[in-house]
Image (spheres, coloured by chain):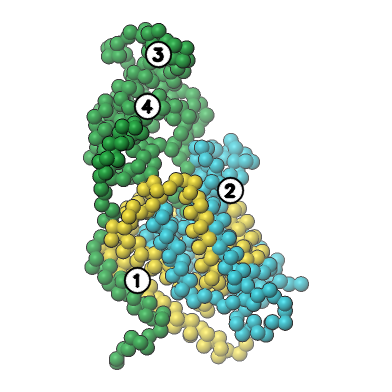
Chain colours: A cyan, B yellow, C green
Amino acid sequence: MQADVQPLTAEQVGAHTHHAVPRAPQPYTNPYLAGFGLGLVLLASFVIMGRGLGASGAFSSLVAFGADAVAPEHTRANAFYAEYLGDHTRHPLMDWLVFEVVGVFAGGFLSGILAGRVRMGIERGPSTTNRMRLMYAFAGGGLMGIGAKLARGCTSGQAMTGGALLNVGSWAFMMCVFAGAYAVAYFVRRQWQ
Amino acid sequence: MNAPFFKFGLFGDNVSLIVAFLIGIGFGFFLERAGFGSARKLTAQFYLTDLTVFKVMFTAIITAMLGLFYLGWMGLVDLSLVYLTPTHLVPQIVGGFLLGAGFVVGGYCPGTACVAASTGKMDALINLLGIILGIVVFGELFPWVEGFYYATPMGQVTLPQLLNLSYGLVVFLVALMAIGAFAGATWVEKRMAARKGGQPS
Amino acid sequence: MKLSLARLTATQKSGLAVALLGLVAAFAGSPYRGPVYTVDAQELARVVETTVDHVTAEDVADWIIQGRTDFRLIDLRTEGEFAEYHIPGAERVPLTALAGYGLQKNETIVIYSDGGIHSAQAWFLLTTQGYKGATMLFGGLEAWKDNVLFPRPAENPTPAQSVQFAKMKEVSKFFGGTPQMDSTAAVTAPSFTMPKLETPQGGAAARGTSPVKKKKEGC
């Protein structure tokens, strides 16, 4: 059976209530309101920690930790991994971003539970298959991993954080993210529509 | 007020990890609130049917930017202590294009992939695995990429510094641009919805 | 066209508020003001008395041998003096450049000069600006020479002192110094030659990797 997860609108909820779901999916929050909340979280990070948010960096620490466990000599000789391993006085996973990303999982889950949007499944457009979707998801992730490392961050760390700080590199990055996405969108439209 | 608190030694590294976790909860919470646990909602941005990504991102930027400006101006926050990632223009441009392409192909960005995975989306989990592989590939190729990685360094530079305008003026211009863009986004969404409604399905 | 405020939606009102905030910002001035620091004389005096404001040369030697990167070593002397000899890993920063050098307010900073006067003044400057981790090298470079590079045994050493001296002999060799056998050797004897500025043997160099600072603030 295909697991085709689509966020339901309030009207659709009424039509689907005979499916016994624990809680009906709620409509999304007003984007400006959600953005305002996000902005306050970012501001809090600036004020409390003197730094912004991030996501990709946590995965870099994870990779460095894994690589160190599997092949320590090779990893420590690599200048990229070494930056995430540090001087070994501290475990590489005892890292600010790692803990932050764990929080992101927790916060996302919390909001999802409250809104009735937690459901196992694979999200895709109606014209593609699960298998294609997963392949695209993996490939897209690979591109993002490389892109995020080159750019020293992703949309959370560079675009949002750097954007708020008026960082030149971050604004350039942000514009290129949108440009790159729009440029490629036409070629993968079948996946979504 | 001695802020940023951490930079003034108000608490140590271990407490900062707890702070990280709490801030992360807020981050993930609002991302999911906006609907970013859904790849289709996220990618709709790039088909101009649902511009929530733009609205949320820029509202967050404007909020934090204005908040930080005024807190700094009031002397409550030492703005010079807030970390600014050094700019390496060309790698960041190339990285941006790659990330954007990966975003629309994979359906998520790293942060939203976490949120989607936490609400049960398997494709988000696969996306995260892809990100991890991408980082491994980058790490392994690093000795050859290192030169490019460090190309065109500009140091820690802000738009006011680059454009030689006052910080407040740039804040104003960004705010104006965002408001204009929000109005534009609403118009685009209405147009796309009307066009879709007028077409036979 | 009359625009009635009441007829605007919540979103539009927020947009107007943002525009106004931005407009005020354009004329407001620089946000880089930062807090004004008050000097608590009593607190400073207490810090001095409890000697938490300095670290010994032996401690710093230990940290360097361990390959720790969680502290910064600041040399206040001139370029010539620095080029002739400096403690491995030290960064040369003249007093006038200290404030703008980019030191973190919560990291450990060890300041040294030849003796103690300049480092004490630098310590005061940094501490009153909110640098919580500023410390001085007790006795400055002179103490480094005396205790680390050219250690001397005590007159009639107790067992504890003998153990300590044995350790300092090894430490001294690590930094390219020469342990003295004679407890009465004068420190300022011209026969002392300062060790060459090479990477210390053993420790990080032997491992083949230099201690790398953990990437703390990127994303």
When asked about the image quadrant of residue A113, the answer is bottom right
Q: Whole-percent x and y of residue B107?
A: 58, 67
Q: Are marks 4 and 3 on the same chain?
A: yes
> Count of labels shown?
4
Question: Real-space Cα distance between discs 2 and 1?
Answer: 38 Å
Question: Chain for mark 4?
Answer: C
The local secondary structure at tag 2 comes to helix
Mark 4–mark 2 distance (CA, rounded to whole Å): 39 Å
Pick the front one: C123 or B102: C123
Left or right of residue A58, residue C4 in this image: left
Amino acid at the residue labelled 4: Thr
Look at mark 1 in the image and give the residue it sits on: B175
- Residue denoted by label 2: A63
Residue for point 33% across, 29% down = C137
Q: Mark 3 lies on which chain?
A: C
SS class, disc 1? helix
Q: Which residue is drawn at 44% across and 83% down?
A: B187
Per the image, the residue denoted by label 3 is C179
Q: How far, Cα to Cα, is label 4 from label 1?
A: 53 Å
Residue beneath disc 4? C56
Left or right of A49, for residue C85:
left
Q: Distance between the residues labelled 2 and 3?
A: 46 Å
Q: What residue type is labelled 1?
A: Ala
Gap in angstroms between the C-alphas marked 1 and 3: 66 Å
Figure check: B79 above or below C148? below
Asked if disc 4 and disc 3 are in contact, CB closer than 8 Å, the reply is no
Separation of disc 4 and disc 3 at Cα? 18 Å
Name the mark on residue A105.
none
